[in-house]
Image: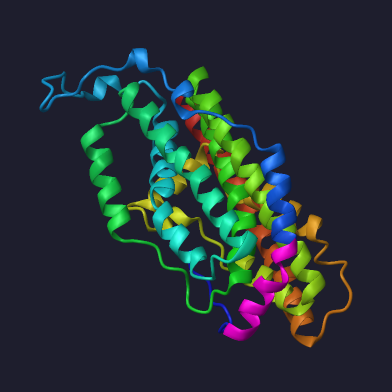
Amino acid sequence: MTTETRPADPTAEYRMLHDLQPVVAENLDRHLAVAKEWFPHEYVPWSAGRDFEGPLGGEPWTPAEEKLPEVARISLVVNLLTEDNLPGYHFAIAQFGKDGAWGSWVDRWTAEEDRHGTALRDYLLATRAVDPRALERARMDHMSGGYRRPDGFSALHAIAYAAFQELATRISHRNTGLQSRDAVCDALLARIAADENLHMLFYRNLVDAAFELDADAAMRAVADVVIGFEMPGSTIKDFGRKSAQIAMAGIYDTRLHHDDVVQPILRQLRVFERGGLGPAGEQAREELAAFTTALDTAARSFTERRDAILAARAKRAG
């Protein structure tokens, strides 16, 4: 995730997070009331598994065991490697403080996110859907690169980014499940997507409250995040090629990003209807409006190109 942001004012940053504490507490209580307990082990087909080669003397993995469609397998691995970097994400938001309700939320969010990676890895290994050695090497490479939030990325930027990213992740997980053509995988990813949706609601509600506290700062943070948005897994090796394949399959693409992530959150936040903005907030809103227009144009161009490519492929195949 890289975005050019304005240098954060530490005093203002901590004041904003302090002022948001009552809203954090309220939304934490709401989250705990509606979040349903679930257990990753119940979504893994353990009976399909068997020992791998190594100290236990099991059977070596072979490419013939790749039963999932290629793009679903690629997306699952990208999603898993993204989840693997959770320690870095936790550290990034915990640096803003662990006092009060915010600290309780950070720990709860981390615990919930951690089971996503656990469940995805267990599913992939039990079904022998991927090369386990390649998967572990990819995990080591990606996590060794760590995660660092961008310079000037304030607590408010982090909260705004999380709102958009959680929704994007929900859509990616849900569509990956549908592409898998496997009922077990689909059910697991639907369950994970439900978590991500609750996380999105939590962060979106905080951004909404921030607009009431400091509309200019909130508008600036939202504009910075939307304009510079990248998925947190963008540092995964060959991410560009893999994300292109994922986009071609319709799992996550520019059209979905504009229509199902950016626009819904901006509407819920009423960014283009709000009054009370100063010059800085109005400038940020103008930048945001120009960017979303350009994003819509890019999305239209992408879908037209994809439709043409898929039509040409179908013609050749037919």
Determine whether, in the image, residue 206 is placed left or right of residue 305: right
Percent across and percent down for residue 301 are 62, 53
* Above-or-below relation of 132 to 201: above
Percent across and percent down for residue 87 are 40, 55
**Residue nearest the viewer, comparing 29 with 146:** 29
Task: Give the residue displayed 21% in from the left and 36% down from the top.
Answer: 133
**Residue nearest the viewer, comparing 86 with 138:** 86
Asked if residue 240 lies in the magenta stretch, the reply is: no
The stretch of residues the image draws in magenta is 10-22
Determine whether, in the image, residue 200 is placed left or right of residue 250: right
Quarter of the rendering containing residue 171: top right
* Above-or-below relation of 126 to 160: above
Q: Can residue 9 be seen in this view?
A: no
Percent across and percent down for residue 36 are 64, 32
**Residue nearest the viewer, comparing 299 with 318:** 299
Per the picture, the main secondary structure of the magenta-coloured stretch is: helix
Determine whether, in the image, residue 68 is placed left or right of residue 254: left
Quarter of the rendering containing residue 32: top right
Task: Give the residue displayed 48% in from the left and 69% down from the top.
Answer: 95
* Above-or-below relation of 151 to 301: below
Q: Is residue 316 visible?
A: yes
Task: Give the residue displayed 61% in from the left and 45% down from the top.
Answer: 303
Task: Give the residue displayed 56% in from the left and 27% down from the top.
Answer: 178
Percent across and percent down for residue 7 are 56, 84
Asked if residue 15 lies in the magenta stretch, the reply is: yes
